[in-house]
Image (cartoon, rainbow, N blue to C red):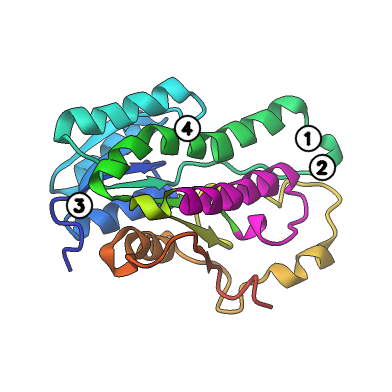
Protein backbone atom coordinates (compact mmCIF):
# COMPACT_ATOMS: atom_id res chain seq x y z
CA UNK A 1 0.00 0.00 0.00
CA UNK A 2 1.19 3.52 -0.79
CA UNK A 3 -0.94 5.35 1.76
CA UNK A 4 1.57 8.19 2.00
CA UNK A 5 2.34 8.81 -1.66
CA UNK A 6 3.24 12.49 -2.05
CA UNK A 7 2.90 13.22 1.67
CA UNK A 8 5.61 14.79 3.78
CA UNK A 9 6.17 13.28 7.20
CA UNK A 10 8.58 14.46 9.91
CA UNK A 11 9.78 11.68 12.22
CA UNK A 12 11.74 12.55 15.36
CA UNK A 13 14.01 10.02 17.05
CA UNK A 14 14.61 8.38 13.67
CA UNK A 15 18.18 7.23 14.32
CA UNK A 16 17.16 4.06 16.15
CA UNK A 17 14.42 2.03 17.77
CA UNK A 18 10.78 2.91 17.15
CA UNK A 19 11.71 6.09 15.28
CA UNK A 20 13.88 4.26 12.77
CA UNK A 21 11.33 1.48 12.35
CA UNK A 22 8.59 4.06 11.75
CA UNK A 23 10.68 5.85 9.14
CA UNK A 24 11.28 2.55 7.35
CA UNK A 25 7.58 1.67 7.43
CA UNK A 26 6.44 5.09 6.24
CA UNK A 27 9.01 5.12 3.44
CA UNK A 28 7.79 1.70 2.31
CA UNK A 29 4.34 3.25 1.95
CA UNK A 30 5.55 6.13 -0.18
CA UNK A 31 6.14 8.91 2.35
CA UNK A 32 8.54 11.78 1.74
CA UNK A 33 10.49 11.86 4.98
CA UNK A 34 12.43 14.30 7.09
CA UNK A 35 14.18 12.10 9.65
CA UNK A 36 15.39 14.02 12.69
CA UNK A 37 17.48 13.06 15.71
CA UNK A 38 20.21 14.34 18.01
CA UNK A 39 22.35 11.54 16.60
CA UNK A 40 22.96 13.02 13.15
CA UNK A 41 25.24 10.20 12.01
CA UNK A 42 22.62 7.66 13.04
CA UNK A 43 19.78 9.43 11.31
CA UNK A 44 21.88 9.83 8.17
CA UNK A 45 22.32 6.05 8.20
CA UNK A 46 18.56 5.67 8.45
CA UNK A 47 18.03 7.92 5.45
CA UNK A 48 20.70 6.08 3.45
CA UNK A 49 18.85 2.81 4.04
CA UNK A 50 15.39 4.11 3.12
CA UNK A 51 15.48 4.74 -0.58
CA UNK A 52 12.85 7.07 -1.94
CA UNK A 53 12.82 10.76 -1.08
CA UNK A 54 14.16 11.50 2.39
CA UNK A 55 16.49 13.85 4.22
CA UNK A 56 18.25 13.88 7.59
CA UNK A 57 18.16 16.69 10.11
CA UNK A 58 19.88 17.28 13.44
CA UNK A 59 17.31 17.91 16.16
CA UNK A 60 17.35 18.46 19.91
CA UNK A 61 13.69 18.31 20.96
CA UNK A 62 14.58 19.87 24.32
CA UNK A 63 15.45 23.08 22.43
CA UNK A 64 12.42 24.88 21.00
CA UNK A 65 14.57 26.73 18.46
CA UNK A 66 15.86 23.39 17.17
CA UNK A 67 12.26 22.16 16.91
CA UNK A 68 11.26 25.20 14.88
CA UNK A 69 14.28 24.72 12.62
CA UNK A 70 13.38 21.09 11.90
CA UNK A 71 9.85 22.01 10.85
CA UNK A 72 11.21 24.90 8.80
CA UNK A 73 13.59 22.48 7.06
CA UNK A 74 10.68 20.32 5.94
CA UNK A 75 8.71 23.32 4.72
CA UNK A 76 11.72 24.85 3.01
CA UNK A 77 12.50 21.63 1.14
CA UNK A 78 9.01 20.39 0.22
CA UNK A 79 6.66 23.29 0.90
CA UNK A 80 4.28 21.31 3.11
CA UNK A 81 3.97 19.02 6.12
CA UNK A 82 1.30 16.33 6.31
CA UNK A 83 2.19 14.44 9.48
CA UNK A 84 4.40 14.81 12.53
CA UNK A 85 5.49 11.68 14.38
CA UNK A 86 6.85 12.62 17.82
CA UNK A 87 8.93 9.56 18.67
CA UNK A 88 12.13 10.98 20.20
CA UNK A 89 12.41 10.13 23.88
CA UNK A 90 14.62 8.83 26.65
CA UNK A 91 14.19 6.41 29.54
CA UNK A 92 15.10 6.90 33.14
CA UNK A 93 14.73 4.31 35.88
CA UNK A 94 15.59 4.30 39.57
CA UNK A 95 14.21 4.87 43.04
CA UNK A 96 12.00 7.98 43.15
CA UNK A 97 13.77 9.42 46.19
CA UNK A 98 17.07 9.30 44.32
CA UNK A 99 16.00 11.28 41.23
CA UNK A 100 17.88 14.58 41.18
CA UNK A 101 16.54 17.83 39.73
CA UNK A 102 18.68 17.64 36.60
CA UNK A 103 17.50 14.12 35.75
CA UNK A 104 13.87 15.08 36.31
CA UNK A 105 14.12 18.17 34.13
CA UNK A 106 15.92 16.28 31.34
CA UNK A 107 13.21 13.62 31.15
CA UNK A 108 10.39 16.17 31.16
CA UNK A 109 12.19 18.44 28.67
CA UNK A 110 12.77 15.66 26.14
CA UNK A 111 9.74 13.40 26.59
CA UNK A 112 7.02 16.01 27.21
CA UNK A 113 8.14 19.55 26.44
CA UNK A 114 9.78 18.31 23.24
CA UNK A 115 6.47 16.87 22.04
CA UNK A 116 4.77 20.18 22.76
CA UNK A 117 7.49 22.26 21.08
CA UNK A 118 7.45 20.12 17.94
CA UNK A 119 3.66 20.19 17.81
CA UNK A 120 3.53 23.95 18.31
CA UNK A 121 5.98 24.49 15.46
CA UNK A 122 4.16 22.07 13.14
CA UNK A 123 0.54 23.01 13.79
CA UNK A 124 0.30 26.02 11.43
CA UNK A 125 1.49 23.82 8.58
CA UNK A 126 -0.69 20.86 9.58
CA UNK A 127 -3.68 23.18 9.57
CA UNK A 128 -2.82 24.10 6.00
CA UNK A 129 -2.52 20.46 4.92
CA UNK A 130 -5.27 19.09 7.19
CA UNK A 131 -2.62 16.78 8.57
CA UNK A 132 -2.09 14.98 11.84
CA UNK A 133 0.21 14.28 14.78
CA UNK A 134 1.15 10.89 16.20
CA UNK A 135 2.80 10.93 19.62
CA UNK A 136 4.59 8.12 21.41
CA UNK A 137 3.53 7.94 25.05
CA UNK A 138 3.88 4.72 27.06
CA UNK A 139 2.03 2.11 29.08
CA UNK A 140 3.91 3.76 31.94
CA UNK A 141 1.76 6.83 31.32
CA UNK A 142 -1.42 4.81 31.81
CA UNK A 143 -0.70 2.65 34.86
CA UNK A 144 1.66 2.89 37.79
CA UNK A 145 5.14 1.70 36.90
CA UNK A 146 7.70 1.14 39.66
CA UNK A 147 11.07 2.84 39.55
CA UNK A 148 9.97 5.13 36.73
CA UNK A 149 8.50 8.19 38.45
CA UNK A 150 9.92 10.83 36.11
CA UNK A 151 9.45 8.72 32.99
CA UNK A 152 5.86 7.86 33.92
CA UNK A 153 5.08 11.50 34.66
CA UNK A 154 6.48 12.60 31.30
CA UNK A 155 4.47 10.00 29.39
CA UNK A 156 1.26 10.68 31.31
CA UNK A 157 1.80 14.29 30.28
CA UNK A 158 1.99 13.22 26.63
CA UNK A 159 -1.36 11.45 27.05
CA UNK A 160 -2.95 14.60 28.45
CA UNK A 161 -1.35 16.84 25.84
CA UNK A 162 -2.57 14.56 23.05
CA UNK A 163 -6.16 14.67 24.26
CA UNK A 164 -6.10 18.44 24.75
CA UNK A 165 -4.71 19.13 21.27
CA UNK A 166 -7.13 16.64 19.72
CA UNK A 167 -10.12 18.46 21.19
CA UNK A 168 -8.79 21.92 20.37
CA UNK A 169 -8.03 21.15 16.72
CA UNK A 170 -10.71 18.60 15.82
CA UNK A 171 -13.05 21.12 14.19
CA UNK A 172 -10.10 22.62 12.30
CA UNK A 173 -9.18 19.40 10.56
CA UNK A 174 -6.06 18.28 12.43
CA UNK A 175 -6.05 14.89 14.14
CA UNK A 176 -3.85 14.14 17.17
CA UNK A 177 -3.37 10.64 18.57
CA UNK A 178 -0.92 8.79 20.80
CA UNK A 179 0.45 5.26 21.04
CA UNK A 180 1.29 3.70 24.38
CA UNK A 181 3.82 0.90 23.88
CA UNK A 182 4.62 -1.52 26.66
CA UNK A 183 7.98 -3.25 26.69
CA UNK A 184 9.69 -2.86 23.30
CA UNK A 185 13.02 -4.38 22.33
CA UNK A 186 14.94 -1.12 21.86
CA UNK A 187 18.07 0.50 23.34
CA UNK A 188 15.83 2.70 25.52
CA UNK A 189 14.70 -0.21 27.69
CA UNK A 190 17.73 -2.48 27.48
CA UNK A 191 19.07 -3.06 30.99
CA UNK A 192 16.97 -0.21 32.36
CA UNK A 193 15.74 -2.02 35.45
CA UNK A 194 18.66 -4.43 35.83
CA UNK A 195 20.97 -1.73 37.14
CA UNK A 196 18.63 -0.69 39.97
CA UNK A 197 19.60 -2.00 43.40
CA UNK A 198 17.00 -3.22 45.85
CA UNK A 199 14.08 -3.70 43.47
CA UNK A 200 11.03 -5.71 44.52
CA UNK A 201 10.40 -8.30 41.79
CA UNK A 202 6.72 -8.69 42.73
CA UNK A 203 6.07 -5.11 41.65
CA UNK A 204 6.73 -6.19 38.05
CA UNK A 205 4.34 -9.13 38.02
CA UNK A 206 1.44 -7.27 36.41
CA UNK A 207 3.71 -5.63 33.84
CA UNK A 208 4.25 -8.77 31.75
CA UNK A 209 2.71 -8.53 28.25
CA UNK A 210 0.17 -11.32 27.75
CA UNK A 211 1.22 -11.87 24.13
CA UNK A 212 4.91 -12.37 24.75
CA UNK A 213 7.99 -10.89 26.41
CA UNK A 214 8.46 -7.78 24.25
CA UNK A 215 7.16 -6.03 21.18
CA UNK A 216 9.40 -5.33 18.22
CA UNK A 217 9.90 -1.75 17.05
CA UNK A 218 8.11 -2.75 13.84
CA UNK A 219 4.96 -3.54 15.84
CA UNK A 220 4.80 0.05 17.04
CA UNK A 221 5.74 1.40 13.61
CA UNK A 222 2.70 -0.35 12.12
CA UNK A 223 0.46 1.51 14.56
CA UNK A 224 2.22 4.81 13.77
CA UNK A 225 1.59 4.30 10.06
CA UNK A 226 -2.06 3.46 10.67
CA UNK A 227 -2.81 6.51 12.82
CA UNK A 228 -0.93 8.83 10.46
CA UNK A 229 -2.83 7.52 7.43
CA UNK A 230 -6.29 8.23 6.04
CA UNK A 231 -7.36 4.81 7.31
CA UNK A 232 -7.60 6.57 10.68
CA UNK A 233 -9.40 9.63 9.30
CA UNK A 234 -12.15 9.39 11.96
CA UNK A 235 -9.79 8.81 14.89
CA UNK A 236 -8.56 11.66 17.05
CA UNK A 237 -7.75 11.87 20.72
CA UNK A 238 -7.15 8.11 20.79
CA UNK A 239 -4.64 6.65 23.21
CA UNK A 240 -3.77 3.34 21.59
CA UNK A 241 -2.13 0.75 23.84
CA UNK A 242 0.22 -1.46 21.84
CA UNK A 243 1.44 -3.46 24.80
CA UNK A 244 0.49 -7.09 24.31
CA UNK A 245 -2.29 -6.76 26.88
CA UNK A 246 -0.08 -5.36 29.62
CA UNK A 247 -2.54 -2.64 30.64
CA UNK A 248 -5.62 -4.80 30.03
CA UNK A 249 -4.87 -7.32 32.78
Is residue 138 shown above or below 55? Answer: below
User: Percent from the top left, x then y, of residue 132?
Assistant: 35, 51
Q: Nearer the viewer, residue 248 or 177?
A: 177
Helix, strand or loop for the magenta stretch, by majority: helix
User: Percent from the top left, x then y, of residue 152?
Assistant: 68, 49
> How far is the residue under mark 2 from the one under mark 3?
41 Å
> How far is the residue under mark 3 from the one under mark 1?
40 Å
Residue found 57% across the figure and 39% down from its top: 112
Describe residue 206's horizontal placement relative to residue 41 as left or right.
right
Is residue 28 shown above or below 196? Answer: below
Closer to the N terminus: mark 1 or mark 4? 1
Image mark for residue 96: 2
User: Percent from the top left, x then y, of residue 4?
Assistant: 20, 57
User: Percent from the top left, x then y, of residue 222?
Assistant: 36, 65
For numbered disc 2, what is the local secondary structure? helix
Crowding at mark 4 (Cα within 10 Å: few <14, some 14-19, many 20+): many
Mark 3–mark 1 contact, CB under 8 Å?
no
Crowding at mark 3 (Cα within 10 Å: few <14, some 14-19, many 20+): many
Disc 3 marks which residue? 31
For numbered disc 3, what is the local secondary structure? loop
Mark 1–mark 2 contact, CB under 8 Å?
yes
For numbered disc 4, what is the local secondary structure? helix
Residue 189 visible in the displayed image: no
Disc 4 marks which residue? 117
Disc 1 marks which residue? 99
Is residue 208 shown above or below 74? Answer: below
Which segment did they paint magenta?
A: 139-168
Mark 1 vs mark 4: give the one in front: 4
Describe residue 195's horizontal placement relative to residue 58 as left or right.
right
Mark 2–mark 3 contact, CB under 8 Å?
no
> How far is the residue under mark 3 from the one under mark 4?
23 Å
Mark 3–mark 4 contact, CB under 8 Å?
no
Amino acid sequence: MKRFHGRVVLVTGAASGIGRASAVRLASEGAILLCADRNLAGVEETVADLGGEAAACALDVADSISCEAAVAAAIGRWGRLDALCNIAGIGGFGHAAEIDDASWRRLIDINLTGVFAMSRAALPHLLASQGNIVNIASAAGLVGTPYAAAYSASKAGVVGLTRSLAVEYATRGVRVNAICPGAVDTPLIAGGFDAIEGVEPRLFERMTPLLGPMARPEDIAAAVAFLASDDARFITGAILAVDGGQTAA
